[in-house]
Amino acid sequence: DTGVSQNPRHKITKRGQNVTFRCDPISEHNRLYWYRQTLGQGPEFLTYFQNEAQLEKSRLLSDRFSAERPKGSFSTLEIQRTEQGDSAMYLCASSLGRPGQGDEQFFGPGTRLTVL
Amino acid sequence: KNQVEQSPQSLIILEGKNCTLQCNYTVSPFSNLRWYKQDTGRGPVSLTIMTFSENTKSNGRYTATLDADTKQSSLHITASQLSDSASYICVVSGGNAGNMLTFGGGTRLMVKP
Protein backbone atom coordinates (compact mmCIF):
# COMPACT_ATOMS: atom_id res chain seq x y z
CA ASP A 1 0.00 0.00 0.00
CA THR A 2 1.65 3.26 -1.11
CA GLY A 3 -0.86 5.60 0.51
CA VAL A 4 -0.50 7.66 3.67
CA SER A 5 -0.22 5.48 6.76
CA GLN A 6 -0.74 6.39 10.40
CA ASN A 7 0.10 4.57 13.60
CA PRO A 8 -1.41 3.67 15.90
CA ARG A 9 -4.97 3.56 14.54
CA HIS A 10 -6.42 3.81 18.02
CA LYS A 11 -4.98 5.08 21.30
CA ILE A 12 -6.62 5.11 24.70
CA THR A 13 -4.79 6.98 27.43
CA LYS A 14 -5.39 8.44 30.84
CA ARG A 15 -5.57 12.16 31.38
CA GLY A 16 -2.14 13.64 32.01
CA GLN A 17 -0.21 11.07 29.99
CA ASN A 18 1.83 11.89 26.90
CA VAL A 19 1.03 10.33 23.52
CA THR A 20 2.86 10.28 20.20
CA PHE A 21 1.42 9.53 16.78
CA ARG A 22 3.31 8.75 13.60
CA CYS A 23 2.49 9.55 10.00
CA ASP A 24 4.24 8.13 6.94
CA PRO A 25 3.36 10.17 3.86
CA ILE A 26 3.38 9.07 0.24
CA SER A 27 7.08 8.77 -0.54
CA GLU A 28 7.55 11.54 -3.10
CA HIS A 29 5.33 14.05 -1.31
CA ASN A 30 7.05 17.17 0.04
CA ARG A 31 4.20 18.52 2.12
CA LEU A 32 2.73 16.91 5.19
CA TYR A 33 -0.29 18.17 7.12
CA TRP A 34 -1.86 17.37 10.49
CA TYR A 35 -5.56 17.86 11.18
CA ARG A 36 -7.86 17.18 14.11
CA GLN A 37 -11.43 16.01 13.62
CA THR A 38 -14.07 15.71 16.31
CA LEU A 39 -17.20 13.64 15.90
CA GLY A 40 -19.63 15.09 13.39
CA GLN A 41 -17.30 17.90 12.35
CA GLY A 42 -14.97 18.49 9.45
CA PRO A 43 -11.19 18.31 9.97
CA GLU A 44 -9.48 21.35 11.49
CA PHE A 45 -5.99 22.33 10.37
CA LEU A 46 -3.22 21.99 12.97
CA THR A 47 0.09 22.38 11.17
CA TYR A 48 2.00 21.58 7.99
CA PHE A 49 5.53 20.89 6.84
CA GLN A 50 7.32 21.59 3.59
CA ASN A 51 10.01 18.91 3.71
CA GLU A 52 11.46 19.19 7.24
CA ALA A 53 10.41 22.81 7.81
CA GLN A 54 7.27 23.48 9.83
CA LEU A 55 5.76 26.41 7.92
CA GLU A 56 2.49 27.08 9.68
CA LYS A 57 0.81 26.29 12.97
CA SER A 58 -2.82 26.83 13.86
CA ARG A 59 -3.93 28.57 17.03
CA LEU A 60 -5.44 25.17 17.90
CA LEU A 61 -1.91 23.85 18.39
CA SER A 62 -1.38 24.67 22.06
CA ASP A 63 1.97 24.47 23.85
CA ARG A 64 1.19 20.87 24.75
CA PHE A 65 1.28 19.88 21.09
CA SER A 66 4.49 19.48 19.11
CA ALA A 67 5.06 18.11 15.64
CA GLU A 68 8.29 17.14 13.95
CA ARG A 69 9.41 15.92 10.56
CA PRO A 70 13.13 15.49 11.19
CA LYS A 71 14.26 14.09 7.84
CA GLY A 72 11.47 15.39 5.65
CA SER A 73 9.86 11.98 5.47
CA PHE A 74 7.72 10.65 8.34
CA SER A 75 6.27 12.98 10.96
CA THR A 76 5.33 12.65 14.61
CA LEU A 77 2.70 14.54 16.58
CA GLU A 78 3.15 14.52 20.35
CA ILE A 79 0.56 15.64 22.87
CA GLN A 80 1.85 16.21 26.39
CA ARG A 81 -0.29 16.10 29.54
CA THR A 82 -3.34 14.98 27.60
CA GLU A 83 -6.76 16.38 28.50
CA GLN A 84 -10.18 14.90 27.83
CA GLY A 85 -10.76 17.64 25.26
CA ASP A 86 -7.92 16.20 23.19
CA SER A 87 -10.07 13.19 22.36
CA ALA A 88 -10.49 13.28 18.58
CA MET A 89 -9.39 11.74 15.31
CA TYR A 90 -5.96 13.00 14.25
CA LEU A 91 -5.59 12.95 10.49
CA CYS A 92 -2.41 13.24 8.49
CA ALA A 93 -2.31 14.19 4.82
CA SER A 94 0.46 14.64 2.28
CA SER A 95 0.81 16.36 -1.08
CA LEU A 96 3.41 16.91 -3.76
CA GLY A 97 3.65 20.58 -2.86
CA ARG A 98 3.06 21.83 -6.40
CA PRO A 99 2.01 25.47 -6.53
CA GLY A 100 -1.43 26.25 -7.92
CA GLN A 101 -4.57 24.22 -8.23
CA GLY A 102 -3.38 20.66 -8.60
CA ASP A 103 -1.84 20.07 -5.20
CA GLU A 104 -4.22 17.40 -3.92
CA GLN A 105 -3.86 16.29 -0.32
CA PHE A 106 -4.15 12.56 0.27
CA PHE A 107 -5.34 11.57 3.72
CA GLY A 108 -4.31 8.74 5.96
CA PRO A 109 -6.81 6.62 7.93
CA GLY A 110 -6.32 8.67 11.08
CA THR A 111 -5.45 7.92 14.70
CA ARG A 112 -8.40 7.96 17.06
CA LEU A 113 -7.38 9.23 20.50
CA THR A 114 -9.54 8.67 23.55
CA VAL A 115 -8.48 10.39 26.78
CA LEU A 116 -10.12 8.93 29.88
CA LYS B 1 -13.19 34.91 7.75
CA ASN B 2 -12.92 31.89 5.44
CA GLN B 3 -15.86 29.57 6.02
CA VAL B 4 -17.54 26.60 4.37
CA GLU B 5 -21.11 25.75 5.32
CA GLN B 6 -22.83 22.54 4.31
CA SER B 7 -26.45 21.47 4.33
CA PRO B 8 -28.19 19.38 5.36
CA GLN B 9 -26.17 18.17 8.35
CA SER B 10 -27.59 14.70 7.91
CA LEU B 11 -29.76 12.92 5.39
CA ILE B 12 -31.48 9.54 5.19
CA ILE B 13 -32.59 8.19 1.82
CA LEU B 14 -33.72 4.87 0.43
CA GLU B 15 -31.44 2.82 -1.77
CA GLY B 16 -31.83 3.72 -5.42
CA LYS B 17 -32.98 7.29 -4.76
CA ASN B 18 -31.08 10.44 -5.76
CA CYS B 19 -29.97 13.20 -3.42
CA THR B 20 -28.24 16.57 -3.55
CA LEU B 21 -25.90 18.01 -0.95
CA GLN B 22 -25.20 21.73 -0.70
CA CYS B 23 -22.08 23.75 0.07
CA ASN B 24 -21.70 27.54 0.48
CA TYR B 25 -18.31 29.16 0.97
CA THR B 26 -16.76 32.52 1.68
CA VAL B 27 -13.11 31.61 1.00
CA SER B 28 -11.28 34.32 -0.90
CA PRO B 29 -9.28 34.29 -3.08
CA PHE B 30 -10.67 31.01 -4.41
CA SER B 31 -8.41 28.32 -5.83
CA ASN B 32 -10.46 25.14 -6.10
CA LEU B 33 -13.27 23.19 -4.46
CA ARG B 34 -13.24 19.49 -3.71
CA TRP B 35 -15.84 17.08 -2.46
CA TYR B 36 -14.51 14.31 -0.22
CA LYS B 37 -16.18 11.11 0.93
CA GLN B 38 -15.28 9.96 4.42
CA ASP B 39 -16.32 6.52 5.60
CA THR B 40 -16.71 6.07 9.34
CA GLY B 41 -13.32 5.76 11.02
CA ARG B 42 -11.39 6.43 7.81
CA GLY B 43 -9.65 9.40 6.23
CA PRO B 44 -11.39 11.50 3.56
CA VAL B 45 -11.04 10.45 -0.08
CA SER B 46 -11.35 12.97 -2.90
CA LEU B 47 -14.34 12.56 -5.25
CA THR B 48 -14.13 15.64 -7.47
CA ILE B 49 -12.15 18.85 -7.86
CA MET B 50 -13.35 21.99 -9.60
CA THR B 51 -11.53 25.19 -10.41
CA PHE B 52 -12.99 28.65 -10.94
CA SER B 53 -13.72 28.06 -14.63
CA GLU B 54 -15.47 24.70 -14.19
CA ASN B 55 -19.15 24.50 -13.37
CA THR B 56 -19.73 20.76 -13.43
CA LYS B 57 -17.65 17.63 -12.88
CA SER B 58 -18.75 13.99 -12.79
CA ASN B 59 -17.23 10.92 -11.22
CA GLY B 60 -19.45 7.93 -11.85
CA ARG B 61 -22.72 8.45 -9.99
CA TYR B 62 -21.39 11.63 -8.36
CA THR B 63 -21.86 14.98 -10.12
CA ALA B 64 -20.58 18.18 -8.59
CA THR B 65 -21.57 21.69 -9.67
CA LEU B 66 -19.94 25.01 -8.91
CA ASP B 67 -21.32 28.53 -9.18
CA ALA B 68 -18.32 30.76 -8.48
CA ASP B 69 -20.46 33.90 -8.66
CA THR B 70 -22.76 32.87 -5.82
CA LYS B 71 -20.02 30.78 -4.14
CA GLN B 72 -22.17 27.69 -4.04
CA SER B 73 -21.52 24.06 -4.90
CA SER B 74 -23.63 20.95 -4.90
CA LEU B 75 -22.95 17.23 -4.99
CA HIS B 76 -25.61 15.11 -6.65
CA ILE B 77 -25.64 11.37 -6.06
CA THR B 78 -27.62 9.31 -8.53
CA ALA B 79 -29.15 5.89 -7.87
CA SER B 80 -27.76 5.70 -4.34
CA GLN B 81 -26.22 2.50 -3.02
CA LEU B 82 -25.78 1.27 0.53
CA SER B 83 -22.03 1.89 0.17
CA ASP B 84 -22.72 5.60 -0.35
CA SER B 85 -23.46 5.85 3.39
CA ALA B 86 -20.70 8.17 4.61
CA SER B 87 -19.92 11.78 5.41
CA TYR B 88 -19.45 14.08 2.42
CA ILE B 89 -17.18 17.01 3.06
CA CYS B 90 -16.88 20.14 0.94
CA VAL B 91 -13.35 21.56 1.02
CA VAL B 92 -12.28 24.88 -0.46
CA SER B 93 -8.66 25.70 -1.23
CA GLY B 94 -7.46 29.25 -1.31
CA GLY B 95 -7.49 32.17 1.05
CA ASN B 96 -4.50 34.33 1.77
CA ALA B 97 -2.44 31.32 2.87
CA GLY B 98 -2.49 29.82 -0.61
CA ASN B 99 -3.03 26.09 -0.54
CA MET B 100 -4.67 26.00 2.87
CA LEU B 101 -7.90 24.05 2.98
CA THR B 102 -11.10 25.17 4.65
CA PHE B 103 -13.37 22.25 5.48
CA GLY B 104 -17.11 22.20 5.81
CA GLY B 105 -18.70 20.30 8.66
CA GLY B 106 -19.89 17.58 6.32
CA THR B 107 -23.22 16.00 5.49
CA ARG B 108 -23.78 12.56 7.01
CA LEU B 109 -25.66 10.46 4.48
CA MET B 110 -27.32 7.20 5.37
CA VAL B 111 -28.70 5.01 2.59
CA LYS B 112 -31.25 2.47 3.81
CA PRO B 113 -32.35 -0.66 1.97
Image (spheres, coloured by chain):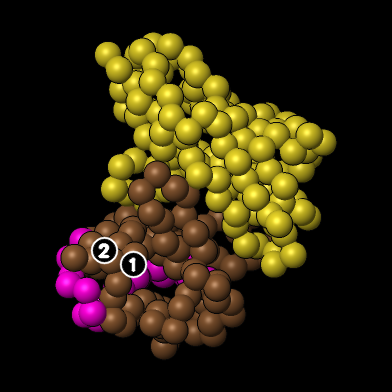
Chain colours: A brown, B yellow
Which residue bears the numbered disc 1? A86
Which quadrant of the figure contains the N terminus of chain A? bottom left
Chain label for disc 1: A
Residue ID at (38%, 20%): B12
Q: Label 2: which residue? A: A113
Q: Is residue B43 visible?
A: yes
| Mark 1: amino acid | Asp
Name the spot of residue B11 as percent of width and height, x first: 43, 24
The magenta stretch spans which residues? Answer: A10-33
Tag 2, which chain? A
Instruction: Give how far across and how far down residue B95 sits, in percent.
Output: 72, 59
**Whole-Å distance between the Cαs marked 1 and 2?**
7 Å
Q: Residue A17 magenta-drawn?
A: yes
Mark 1 touches mark 2? (CB < 8 Å):
yes
Q: For the residue labelled by badge 2, is the local secondary structure a helix, a strand or a loop?
A: strand
Quadrant of image for the C terminus of chain A = bottom left
Viewer-side residue, A20 vs B6: B6
> What residue is drawn where x is 30% and y is 42%?
B40
Extreme bottom residue here? A70
